[in-house]
Amino acid sequence: MSYSVTDPSLRQKWGAGILVITYALITLLPLVWIVATGFKSPADSIAYPPKIVFQPSLEGYVNLFTTQTRASEETLKALGEPTTWYDKIVRAKNMMIAGPSRFPERFFNSVIIGFGSTFFAIVLGTAAAYAFSRFRVPLKDDLLFFILSTRMMPPIAVAIPIFLMFRHLGLSDTHAGMILLYTAVNLSLSVWLINGFIDEIPIEYEEAALIDGYTRFQAFYKVVLPQAATGIASTAIFCLIFAWNEYAFAVLLTSGNAQTAPPFIPTIIGVGGQDWPAVAAGATLFLLPVMIFTILLRKHLLRGITFGAVRK
C-alpha cells in the first residue's frame, strides 16, 4: 500500500490534536481563573476549597474603579436611597463612595508609555536595521553584538545608575522618561529582529526602483517597508508586551504622575486585606489591550515568525 512520507497518519493527527488541546487548556486555565475571580465576592475569592460555582458579583469592578470609605448609619440615612447599581453594592457594606480610584489614570499611563515606546522603538529600529542591512557599516558585526548585549543585561543591574541619572535630569516619574527608557531597552530587540527580515528581502528590488528614478528614501518607503511589514508587526508585538508588562523600572522610577498599572494593581487593598476580586478585575482589564493588539496583527505575527524558514 502506497503512502506519503509527508502527510501524517490518522493516529498522528489525533495525537497532535490531543496535545494541542491539552496545552491550550493548561495555558488558558490561569487566565480563566483570573477572569472568574473578578466576578466573585471577596468571601468567595478566598474560599477553601476554591469555589468553581458561585454567585456572580460586580463588587470587584466597583471596588477597582471607586474609592470607598466607611460611614455611620446616620450618614448613610442622610444620603438617602442609592440611585445607581454600584452605589447599592457599596451601601450593602455600610460604606460610601468617596470618589473615583486611580486605576483609570494608571491604565492610561500604561497605554501612553507602552504604545509610545513601541512606536519609537519600531521607527528607530527599522531605520537602524535598514542601515546595517544595506550599507557598509564599519565593525558591523561588533556593533550588532554590542546592541544585542544591552538586551542581555538584567534590569536590576542598571536600576540604581538609571535612577540617579533620571533624578539628575528630572525624568523621574515622567511619561517622557519612561518612554525613553523602554525605547532604549526595546531598541536592541527591534534592530536585530527587523534586520533579519530586511536581509531576506532581495536587494535587486531596490536597485530596480533606483534605476526607475526612485530616491533612496522612496525605495525604502515603497519597496522595503511593504515587504518587511510582517516582521515589523511581529516585532511591535514583542516590544509592546515588554513595555506593557515591565515592573521593576516602573516601581523604581514612578510613584504618581507616570505610574503604570503593573505596580498599582498589587496595591489595591480592601476591607481587612487584599481585595482579590478587584485585583483580578484590574488584571483582566490590563490583559485586553495587548490581547486585542495581538489578535489584530495575528496574521502578520504568524507570517513573521515563519518568514525565511523555507528558502526557494
Image: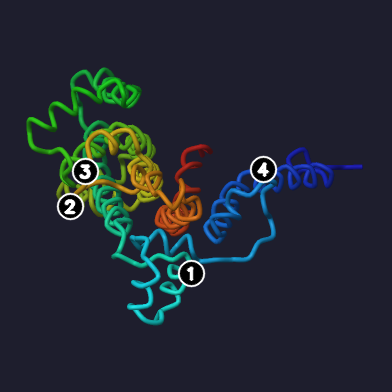
Task: Give the residue type that dot 1 points to.
Answer: Ala
Which residue is nearer to you in this view: 165 or 82? 82
At a point 92% along the width and 42% down the height, the residue shown is: 1
Q: Are marks 1 and 2 in contact (CB under 8 Å)?
A: no
Who comes first in sequence, dot 1 or dot 4?
A: 4
- Asked whether the residues under the numbered discs 4 and 2 touch, taking CB atoms below 8 Å apart as contact, a structural biologist would say no
Q: Residue at x 41, y 53 (%)?
A: 286
Which element is circle 1 on?
A: loop
Q: Nearer the viewer, mark 1 or mark 3?
A: 1
Residue 213 position, x and y percent, is: 16, 53
Residue occupying image coordinates x 24% and y 39%: 183
The three-letter amino acid code for the residue at tag 3 is: Ile
Mark 2: few/some/many CA within 10 Å (<14, 14-19, 20+): some
Few, some or many C-alpha atoms within 10 Å of disc 1 (few <14, some 14-19, many ≥20)? few
Q: CA distance from mark 1 to mark 4?
A: 42 Å
Please state which of residues 289 and 140 is positioned toward the viewer in this rendering. 289
Could you give the CA–CA distance between mark 4 and mark 3, rounded to whole angstroms? Answer: 35 Å
Label 2 SS: loop
Residue 135: image quadrant is: top left
Secondary structure beneath label 3:
helix
Give the structural element (helix, strand or loop) at label 4: helix
Toward the front, the furthest residue is 74
Q: CA distance from mark 1 to mark 3?
A: 43 Å
**Residue holding disc 4:** 23
Colouring style: rainbow
Q: Which residue is mark 2?
A: 214
Q: Which residue is mark 1?
A: 92
The residue type indicated by label 2 comes to Tyr
Counting residues from the N terminus, which is met first, the one under dot 4 or under dot 2? 4
Q: Which mark, by number, is residue 179?
A: 3
Labels 1 and 3: the sequence-earlier one:
1
Mark 4 residue crowding within 10 angstroms, few (<14) / some (14–19) / many (20+) = few
